Image (spheres, coloured by chain):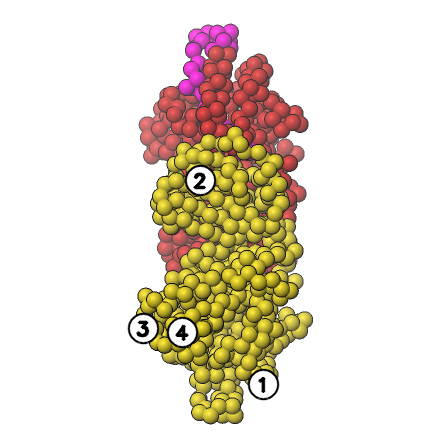
Chain colours: A red, B yellow
C-alpha cells in the first residue's frame, strides 16, 4: 500500500503525475549518475554518485548511535574545505565491518579520486586534482555483512562516464530510487527562494522506511542548493532546522548506525556573500530549507515500513519543548497506539496511556485530547459531545491528526509517524531473505 | 500459539499436566472466589475476590505512569494497618473515568464492607467490623470507558457466598484466569521455604500480555504468603526484588495506567517475629519471593501478546547496572530485533543497532555478542567460526538467549521479552471489537 500524501507538502501545491517534484531540473554545479552494482541481485539501482565539478560547501549531521558505520567514521575524518563528491550505496550498511569496511572506502575513494581527476583533465579548463579526502560516503542496508568493495569499484568507471553537467527530473527520481532500501516511493522535495536579488534552488532527496528515530531521524537525507553559503553557516542552518523535521520523525523507535543528513552548496547562483546566520537575506532561505526538510521527513513517515496511515501528533501548551517532544514521541512510538490506528479503532485510552508513560509531569485535570476535528477530553473530562462512531469514521482516513493539549505552558512539538501493521512485521521478519 | 515454557521456572522442577502449579493448595487466612459480571459479554470470569478473614499485612508497588487509574488512586489513599480484601476486575481499567470511576469504587467498597461484616458475624467467633478503607482494588482493561459499578456490585453477594476457607489448585487457576485480559494462559507460581523452624508458602498469580514495560512492568501481580511479616518489611522485600523481576519484563515498551504488584501476608504460619529485612531468617524467604516474582515475570513475557518466542537478553560486564538495563531494554523494545526473531532470522546487526541507540557509552572494540551458544562478535571482531546457518537453526527454538558483553565493568542485567508477530498486530488492531 502506498499512502497518497498528495501535494500538500509542496508550498507550490501543484498537481501532476510526477507529484510535486515535477519542477526538479538542473542544479548548477552538480552532476548525478546512478547505476546498479547488482548488490540486491536483481539489477536495481543501488549506487549513486553526486559530483560537484567545482566543489561544494557542505555540512552534515550524523546518527547519535554509539555504534556508527565505517562510512560515518570516514566522513567524520574529512576536513576538506570543499567536497568534490558524495557516493551513496544501498543494500550494505558498512557497519560492524571492521578494518575491511574502512579499507574498502579508502579503495573506493582512491579510485574515485584518480578517475575524477582524469575526468577533470578532459572536461575542465582549469583541472584540479581531486583528493580521496574530498569524498564523502553514504551507506545503508544490512549491518555486519562484508562490504562489497569490488562490486562497487567495478561500477565507478560507468558512474563517471555517465556524468552529464545537466539534470532533469528523471535523473533526480532515478537518484532518489537508487538510495532506497525497503522504501516504496522515492522521496524528493524542492523549493526556490531568493537570497538578495538572486533566485536559488533547494532540492532534496531522502530514504527512510525502517529504523527511523531521533536523534537524528532518517537514514539518509541529502539537500543540494546552488546558493553560495559557507560551510559554517550551512551547519548552523542544518542544526537549527533538523529538530522539528528529520528529528521529529519516528517509524518504529529504532535508530540506525548510518543516519546522515547533509547539505551541499555549489555557489553557482552567485548570490552576494552572506556573513552570518542572522543575515536578513537568509530568512527566506531558512524557511525554504525547513520546508524541504519537513517535506522529506513527512514522506519518510508516510512511507514507513508497512504504513497504511500517516500520523501527526501535536502536543501543545507544554512547559518546555522537550516535554512536548517526549509526549509526542511516547505516542508515536507506542505499538499499542500504532496498532489501534492500523485497526481504525478510536481507542484513545491508549493515547492517554502513552501520555502517562512519557515521564512528563502533567495535570490530568487540565489535559485535553482531540482526534482530527473531534474533541474527546476537555480539561480531564470526557465530553458529552464525544461520539465514538464519528471518530471511528475519521479513523478510516489516510491522514490522522492527534492533538494533545497539556494546558500548562506555551511550547509545542509535532511528531510524524505511521501506523503499525502486519505488513511491517512481514517486511522485517524476512528483510534479508 | 502458546509457548511451552516448561517447568524450568519452578525450583522444584516437577512435571505434570497442571504444569508447575500442581502443588498449589490452601493458604491459611485467605479465601478466593471468582465469578462473571459478564463484562466481556461472554460469561467468562472477570471478577475475583481475595478475602483475608483475619486481615493481612501488605505492600504494593504501582505504575510509574503520570496518569493513574481510579483504583490506584483509591489504593494510595488506604492507610489501614491490615487489609481485609482485594477485589480485582478485568475488562475495564477504571482509568480516565473521572469522579464516577472513583465513586464507583466507593460504592463497591461500602457494599463489600457491609456484606463482609455480616459474613464475619456468621462465621467468626470474634467478628470484626470491616471498613471500606480495609479494601484494595485491582482493575485492568480498556481505558476511558464508564466503570461498570452496577454490574460488579450485583455480583458481590455471589462472591461472598462462594467464600470457602480452603482452596485447591483449581480455585487458584480459576482466580488466575479471572484476572486475565488477552492473556492466553493463567500465570501462577509457588515456592515454599522456612522462616526459622516454620514452613511458609509463597503463592503468586499475575496477568500480563500487552502494555508491559517498566517501571514497573506487569499489569497485575499478587503474591500471597502465610508468613508473619510486617507491612514495612514486606514493602522492603517487594522493592528489593521487583527491579530484576517485574521491572525486567517488556512486551511492547508500553506502560499501563493500572500496573500493580502487591504482597499480602496472613501471618498464619506463626513464625517467630522478624524484626528487620537483614534478619538471617529472611534469607530463604527473600530468595523464594524472588523466585516467585521471576517465575511470574517470565510467564508474562512468554505470554506477551502474539508471542511465538520467549527471549532473554543478558547484558554483561557494564560499568553500572543501569547501563546494562538500558541496553537490555533497548534490544528488548526494538521492533526490528523483535520482528527478526519472529522471522527466525539471525539478523544480529539489528542487535548491534539497538545497543548503539541505547545511549550508553560503549567501546565497539570491546563488544562481544553471543546468540544462544553461538559466538558472533568477540571484542569487536566478527569471528571466523561464526556460521549464520548454525544460528539460523538455533533461531527456530522457542527460547532465545542473547548475550551482550561490554567488557567494561562488572554489572549485569537480564531483560525478558517476546518476539513481535503479526498476531500482536491482530490482537491490538481490534482489541475492542
Q: Magenta span covers which residues?
A: A116-143
On the image, the x and y values in percent for residue B153 come to 56, 81
Q: CA distance from mark 1 to mark 3?
A: 38 Å
Q: Considering only order in the chain, which callout, 2 or 1, is on the residue closer to the N terminus? A: 1
Dot label at residue B161: 1
Q: Outermost residue, front direction?
A: B197
Q: Is residue A319 above or below residue B78?
A: above
Verify CB contact (< 8 Å) between mark 4 and mark 2.
no
* Chain of the residue displaying label 2: B
Residue at (51% x, 50% y) in the render: B312
* Chain of the residue displaying label 1: B
Q: Considering only order in the chain, which callout, 1 or 4, is on the residue closer to the N terminus? A: 1
Q: Are callouts 4 and 1 both on one chain?
A: yes
The answer to whether any part of residue B353 appears in the image is no
On the image, the x and y values in percent for residue A422 come to 64, 48
* Chain of the residue displaying label 4: B
Q: CA distance from mark 4 to mark 2?
A: 51 Å
Q: Residues within 10 Å of mark 4 (few under 14, many from 20)?
A: few
Which residue position is annotated with label 4? B197
Badge 3 marks a residue whose secondary structure is: loop
On the image, the x and y values in percent for residue B358 come to 43, 44
Verify CB contact (< 8 Å) between mark 1 and mark 3.
no
Q: Considering only order in the chain, which callout, 2 or 4, is on the residue closer to the N terminus? A: 4
Give the foreground label among 4 and 2.
4
Q: Is residue A123 magenta?
A: yes
Q: CA distance from mark 4 to mark 3?
A: 16 Å
Q: Residues within 10 Å of mark 2 (few under 14, many from 20)?
A: many
Which residue position is annotated with label 3? B275
Give the foreground label among 3 and 2.
3
Give the foreground label among 4 and 1.
4
Which residue position is annotated with label 2? B356
Q: Is residue A331 above or below residue B275?
A: above
Amino acid at each position: 500500500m502506498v499512502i497518497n500524501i498528495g501535494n500538500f507538502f509542496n508550498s507550490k501545491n501543484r498537481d501532476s503525475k510526477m507529484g510535486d517534484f515535477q519542477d526538479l531540473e538542473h542544479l548548477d554545479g552538480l552532476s548525478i549518475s546512478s547505476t546498479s552494482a547488482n548488490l540486491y541481485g536483481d539489477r536495481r539501482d543501488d549506487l549513486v554518485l553526486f559530483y560537484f565539478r567545482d566543489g561544494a560547501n557542505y555540512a552534515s549531521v550524523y546518527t547519535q548511535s554509539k555504534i556508527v558505520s565505517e562510512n560515518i567514521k570516514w566522513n567524520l575524518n574529512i576536513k576538506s574545505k570543499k567536497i568534490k563528491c558524495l557516493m551513496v550505496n544501498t543494500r550494505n550498511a558498512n557497519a560492524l565491518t571492521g578494518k575491511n569496511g574502512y579499507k574498502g572506502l579508502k579503495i573506493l575513494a582512491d579510485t574515485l579520486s584518480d578517475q575524477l581527476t582524469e575526468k577533470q583533465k578532459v572536461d575542465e579548463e582549469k583541472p584540479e586534482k581531486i583528493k580521496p579526502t574530498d569524498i564523502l560516503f553514504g551507506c545503508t542496508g544490512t549491518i555486519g555483512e562484508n562490504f562489497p568493495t569490488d562490486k562497487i569499484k567495478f561500477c565507478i568507471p560507468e558512474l563517471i562516464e555517465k556524468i552529464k553537467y545537466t539534470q532533469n527530473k528523471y535523473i533526480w527520481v532515478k537518484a532518489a530510487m537508487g538510495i532506497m532500501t525497503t522504501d516504496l516511493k522515492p522521496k524528493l522535495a524542492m523549493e526556490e527562494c531568493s537570497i538578495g536579488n538572486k533566485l536559488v534552488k533547494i532540492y532534496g532527496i531522502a530514504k527512510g522506511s525502517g529504523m527511523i528515530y531521533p536523534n537524528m531521524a532518517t537514514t539518509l537525507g541529502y539537500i543540494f542548493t546552488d546558493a553560495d553559503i559557507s560551510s559554517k553557516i550551512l551547519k548552523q542552518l542544518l542544526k537549527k532546522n533538523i529538530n522539528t523535521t528529520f528529528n521529529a520523525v519516528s517509524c518504529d523507535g529504532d535508530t540506525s548506525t548510518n543516519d546522515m543528513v547533509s547539505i551541499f552548496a555549489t555557489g553557482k547562483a552567485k548570490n552576494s556573500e552572506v556573513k552570518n546566520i542572522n543575515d536578513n537575506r537568509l530568512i527566506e532561505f531558512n524557511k525554504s530549507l525547513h520546508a524541504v526538510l519537513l517535506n522529506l521527513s513527512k514522506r519518510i513517515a508516510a512511507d514507513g515500513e508497512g504504513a497504511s496511515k500517516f500520523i501527526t501528533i501535536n502536543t501543545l501548551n507544554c512547559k518546555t519543548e522537550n516535554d512536548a517532544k517526549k509526549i509526542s514521541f511516547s505516542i508515536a512510538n507506542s505499538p499499542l497506539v500504532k496498532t489501534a490506528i492500523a485497526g481504525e479503532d478510536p481507542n484513545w485510552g491508549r493515547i492517554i496511556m502513552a501520555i502517562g508513560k512519557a515521564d512528563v509531569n502533567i495535570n490530568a485535570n487540565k489535559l485535553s485530547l482531540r482526534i482530527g476535528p473531534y474533541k474527546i477530553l476537555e480539561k480531564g473530562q470526557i465530553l458529552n459531545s464525544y461520539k465514538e462512531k464519528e471518530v471511528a469514521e475519521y479513523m478510516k482516513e489516510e491522514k490522522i491528526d492527534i492533538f494533545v493539549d497539556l494546558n500548562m505552558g506555551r511550547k509545542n512539538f509535532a511528531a510524524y509517524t505511521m501506523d503499525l501493521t502486519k505488513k511491517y512485521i512481514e517486511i522485517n521478519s524476512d528483510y534479508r531473505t
